[in-house]
Amino acid sequence: MAPRISVVIPLYNRAGYIVETLDSIASQHTQPHEVIVVDDASTDDSMAVVEAYRQRSPLALQLVSNTRQKGVSGATNTGMQLATGELIALHDSDDLWTPQHLQQLTQVLAQHSDIDFAFSAFEFFGDSSDVTSNAEHFKASVKLMMAAAFECTATHTWVSNAALLESILGIGFVFRCQASLMRRSAIERHHLLFEEALSFTQDSHFMTLAASHGRFAYIDRLGVRVRRHQENSAPDYYGEKIINGYALRAKLLKAEFGHRSLTPAQRKALNQRLWNLQSQVMWSRSRGQPLGTRLQHCGELLSTVPSVASLKSCIKNLLSTAPRA
């Protein structure tokens, strides 16, 4: 008997895109058991659009509303906790799945019972100016990840090896959550949820935690088309969320892994990631500030990553940053 699949879609003000997204689910060769759309206090017609779609669609579509706005992480958590399928697929409310997406990932997990998280290849599309640069960046990162932490099987599926965690810490999370299929048993066993306080790089944080508990598989066949548009790529879309997210993620990573038993390679990768995040916070928040403020942010970096690299960054910061006139 084929495993049941629950699809979880966090939704906020995507009335203009959500129908196309739901159509891409309805066209799947392997149909999901349920589709849970979690509205996060949308202020446009998103709820009405989804309800109208539900009435005419063969999909087993549930529309849930958060009682308060929780952000994309909170909305995703709501859906994951309501899911009843053995497998959970995450989807964004403005992206598209290719018809074979669920089918190919279901087959991967059926062939590899020891793997809990599987990913399809993805591509970017849309009218944003960063489509090409994003595509080139992620293509190079995926290639690097495959060489560092994956091995190709006879069925042309890439499966992770023992270097997965250190590689994700070092290289970053190179896949996309909306291109994933996960075993619900693994999510529940390891108490994996998205960090609701994070509104930037929350996918990376979730999957870094997942990589510390289970193995990943990757299939190099297109499964997801990631839409880039003005609402999710403009410089002011994330704004201060980026730096706040970096600062919080550094704290979360240190709290999660700081006292774990890690290999020397994993510890080195963790420290490099912490330095990368916290140094960006230091430079951003020190720009144009007086000496006392810059010293405070340097202290935060040294506290997070007490290393020669951090000390050098602090010295460079204090010598090069002039106070605001």
Image: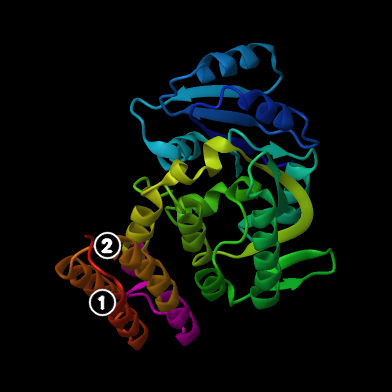
Query: In screen coordinates, is 306 left or right of 27?
Result: left
Residue interval drawn in magenta? 252-270
Instruction: Say which label, 2 or 1, has the lower sequence index.
Output: 2
- Against 180, is 53 above or below? above
Query: In screen coordinates, is 173 left or right of 22?
Result: left
- Against 27, is 170 above or below? below
Give how far across and how far down residue 123 sits, in percent.
Answer: 72, 49
| Residue type at the position of mark 2 | Gly
Q: Residue at x 48, y 19 (%)?
A: 44
Q: Quadrant of the C terminus?
A: bottom left
Q: Which of the 4 image quadrants contains residue 115?
A: bottom right
Query: In screen coordinates, is 318 left or right of 146?
Result: left
Colour scheme of the rendered structure = rainbow
Q: Residue at x 75, y 58 (%)?
A: 219
| Residue type at the position of mark 1 | Leu
Q: Which of the 4 image quadrants contains residue 318?
A: bottom left
Q: Label 1, on which residue? A: 318
Q: Is mark 1 on a helix, strand or loop?
A: helix
- Against 115, is 179 above or below? above
- Against 64, is 182 above or below? below
Q: Which residue lies furthest to the right in this view?
A: 154
Q: Does the magenta stretch include residue 241?
A: no
Q: Residue furthest left?
A: 292
Query: In screen coordinates, is 183 left or right of 277?
Result: right
Q: What element carries label 2?
A: loop
Q: Label 2, on which residue? A: 288
Q: Which residue is drawn at 68% across and 23% down?
A: 59
- Asked if one can make out residue 114 in the rendered structure from this viewpoint, the answer is no
Give how far across and how far down residue 140 sits, in percent.
Answer: 69, 67
Give how far across and how far down residue 84 sits, in percent.
Answer: 55, 36
